[in-house]
Image (cartoon, rainbow, N blue to C red):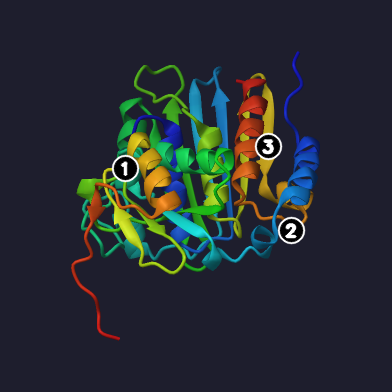
Amino acid sequence: MRDLSEHIMDIIQNSVRANATLVELEISEDMVEDKYTLLFKDNGCGMSEEVLAKVSDPFFTSRTTRRVGLGISLLKQNAEQTGGSLRIWSKEGEGTQLEVIFSHSNIDRPVLGNIAETMMLLVGANPEMDFLYKHTTSGGEYVFDTKEVKEVLEGVSLSNPNILVYIKEMINENLNTII
Amino acid sequence: MAKVKSLADLKKMKDNLQSKMDLREKSDAPNSMVQVKVGMATCGIASGAKEVMNFFIEESAKRGISAVVTQTGCMGYCYAEPTIEVIIPGKDPIVFGDVDVKRADEIIEKYIKNGELVDGIIPVNYNTID
């Protein structure tokens, strides 16, 4: 993975596969405490304790197409390389929460990358799901909420390419005012 | 400071777009449209599937192709990521492997527009008997 936006895309695919209807992503940049935190929350099917114990094992996956599951392992490794951590909470039938902490100033912390593209691709591929993305920095806060977008669109599909391109530019421009 | 894009502008754009949309698009029936599914699991993302999917969305907006671009999980062809599946209405689905932006462009121009096959097809090796 080249940047955090790719990791985020990857982790949220797990929520998609868990049939979540709402995925929340919160990124907070705290220069004072030197923390760069990603917090994921979904209301998907969750995991049993046995599965939860094995999620960061690269040789465990719930897929049948291949025998390795590297998504969480790679993110965990990246976080730990900067002195950070990855923690998961999950309850069967209720949902999953994942918190990844990086050291903000560490040279090994991947850059955020094109997060607007990640959100746009997720929204376009899963128009029936809702995504809430909140980004906080010392410069301010930006919230992107698909519920608001859907209200504005009044039934026009979110997967329309023209609308998606616009959404990407909107997220990008708004983020640039706080990052 | 330049004005930043907002939801209010999105509404204007939607109204504008709605008036231009043809009936087929309004019906929102994916079966009558070209479907492009991009393999977006860890293997795909690590090989650049995001870039490819973004390319398909941007180009179908630019070139006016009515396509539904969506994501799918790992198809088991990790060695050939990024992989995409293209379904043209009335035809069998075709899976292309090792799709970069250059090949994606070729797929749009040759296969999606003209039905002409291009390199990189992953053959279907069996069919189940219904």
The residue under label 3 is A143
Tell me the tag on residue B54.
Answer: none
Task: Pick whichever, A107 or B5, lies toward us.
Answer: B5
Of marks 1 and 2, the one in the foreground: 1
Q: Residues within 10 Å of mark 1 (few under 14, many from 20)?
A: many
Q: The residue under label 1 is which amino acid type?
A: Val
The residue under label 2 is A155
The residue under label 1 is B99
Disc 1 chain ID:
B
Give the distance between the C-alpha atoms of the residues marked 2 and 3, in whole angstroms.
22 Å
Do labels 1 and 2 touch, CB within 8 Å?
A: no
The percent coordinates of residue B48 (x first, y second) are 35, 37
Q: The residue under label 2 is which amino acid type?
A: Gly
Is the residue at mark 3 from the same chain as the one at mark 1? Answer: no
Question: For the residue labelled by badge 2, is the local secondary structure a helix, a strand or a loop?
Answer: loop
Q: The residue under label 3 is which amino acid type?
A: Val
Q: Is A94 rendered above or below residue A138?
A: below
Question: For the residue labelled by badge 3, is the local secondary structure a helix, a strand or a loop?
Answer: strand
Do labels 3 and 1 touch, CB within 8 Å?
A: no
Q: Residues within 10 Å of mark 2 (few under 14, many from 20)?
A: few
Residue B77 visible to the viewer: no
Residue, x 30% and y 43% (percent of image)? A73
